[in-house]
Amino acid sequence: MNIDFLKENLHTKILHTAQLNQVLMELIEDEDIEKEDKEKIINNVLERESVMSMQLKNGVFIPRSKMENKTFKIFIGITKDDIIHKDSSINIIILFLYSKEYEEQYIELLAYMIRLFLWKSLRDSISEVEEDEEIEDIIIKGISEIED
């Protein structure tokens, strides 16, 4: 795993809304993405979710949206309040935005994220953070532990 690539493309945030579509928008709101494109991303995620869910049983939701322009970004957000989706609670969202050129990186990082977030201790640590940057620190440390 290329930790520098992850650090360059990882965006973390403590979220403050409780509706799934609002949370997704809050997660990407600070990014340099046109408003119409942000709305397309949210609609794409919600449409794909209605067909096939990437919600894990432990409160983790891992949606994705393929992008037309050359892009790779991973957004990780936590919410202190449960988001109810498909009769389950979500507290952690890992959103991947990527283009065709980055499919290999997406698959590799998806595998890492699923493995990381199976650890209850990691989920517990992330749920207790008070600053956005703490999320990134926990993720990088967790990946380093997987690779050791």
Image (cartoon, grey):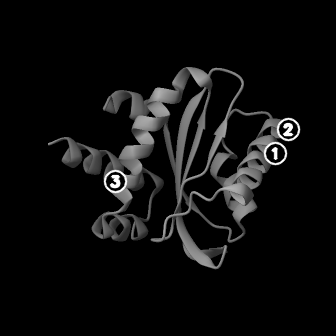
Viewer-proximal residue among 146 and 8: 146
How far across and how far down the image is residue 1, in percent?
30, 32
Q: Is residue 90 above or below residue 115?
A: below
| Disc 2 from disc 3: Cα separation | 33 Å
Q: In the displayed structure, does residue 147 sit left or right of residue 126? A: left
Cβ atoms at labels 1 and 2 below 8 Å apart: yes
Q: Secondary structure at mark 1?
A: helix
The residue that label 3 is drawn on is 115
Q: Residue at (66%, 46%) from the top-left corner?
A: 28
What amino acid type is highlighted by mark number 2? Glu
Viewer can see residue 79: no
**What percent of the width, then of the height, locates residue 98?**
59, 32
Q: Residues within 10 Å of mark 2 (few under 14, many from 20)?
A: few
Helix, strand or loop at label 3? It is helix
Which residue is label 1 attached to? 39
- Eyeballing the image, is 68 above or below 135? above
In front here: 30 or 46? Answer: 46
Q: Please tell me which residue lies in front, 54 or 41.
A: 54
Mark 3: few, some, or many residues within 10 Å (few <14, many ≥20)? few
- Residue type marked 1: Glu
Residue 18 visible in this rendered orientation of the protein: yes
* Lower sequence index among marks 2 and 3: 2
- The local crowd at label 1, few if under 14, some if 14 to 19, many if 20 or more residues have their Cα within 10 Å, is some
Residue 148 location in percent, x, y?
14, 42
| Residue furthest left in the image | 148
Instruction: Quickly name the residue at label 2.
Output: 36
Q: Residue furthest right?
A: 36
Tell me which residue sits at (45%, 44%) in the image.
110
